[in-house]
Image (cartoon, rainbow, N blue to C red):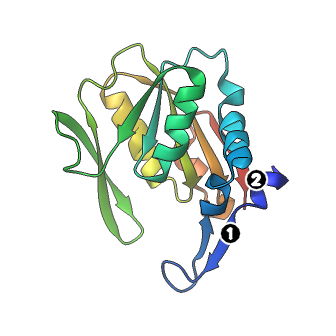
Amino acid sequence: MKRLEAHIRNIPDFPEPGIQFKDITPLVKEPAMLRLAVNQLIHPFLGENITAVAGMEARGFIFGSLAAWELGIGFIPLRKPGKLPYDVQSMSYDLEYGSATLEVHTDALKKGDRVLLVDDLIATGGTAAASCQLIEKLGAEVAACAFVVELDFLKGREKLSKYNVHSLIHY
């Protein structure tokens, strides 16, 4: 994972003072690193009967859609409100400074689906936990959660304690 970590850029004081932003842009622009990251995200779940991959807007779309492609299954986008044109289910959750909502089409998943939730980074875990609840609201099962980066000191994994969580790089 050191090879991947070498392609993550630290941006100090973004988006606000005191935050050390982990920028994945250098990683995704290098085809070999992007392929390595996607392969390592899905590797523990090969043979686990995953039926769909879900990813949160926006960077989860990058890794999630590629993971779905590699697994030969569909990708389910979890979007910000007002972006999906069909009937939706919603899940609101708290952020550090306010709240947010994710939506998914009501027919995106069904009972019996086993979903791999994928995102670029887990910090406090609020978005991932809400995503898992949204997936379960449709009757599907969260088979596991996979992240390129985990900020261990923010303890986001604790909010996902009932799920199998796999992260490639830990800070």
Q: Where is 153 relative to 2, above or below?
A: below
Residue 49 screen position, x and y as percent:
57, 14
- Label 2: few (<14), some or many (≥20) within 10 Å? some
Front residue of 138/108: it is: 108
Relative to 46, is 84 above or below?
below
Closer to the chain start, of discs 2 and 1, is: 2
Which residue is painted at 62% across and 66% down in the image? Answer: 22
Task: Using the image, tell me which numbered label, if any, was put on residue 4.
Answer: 2
Where does the C terminus fall, quadrant-wise?
Answer: bottom right
Q: Please report the residue visible at 55 percent of the width from the left and 36 percent of the height from the top.
A: 66
Q: Amino acid at mark 1?
A: Arg
Q: CA distance from mark 2 to mark 1?
A: 11 Å
* Closer to the camera in the image, 127 or 9: 9
Task: Inspect the image, locate mark 2, and give the three-letter code of the amino acid beneath it.
Answer: Leu
| Mark 1 neighbour density, 10 Å: few (under 14) some (14–19) many (20 or more) | some
The location of residue 82, given as percent across then percent down, is 19, 50
Query: Where does label 1 land, which residue?
Result: 9
- Dividing the picture into quarters, in which one does residue 18 lie? bottom right
- Image coords of residue 133 (percent x, y): 38, 37
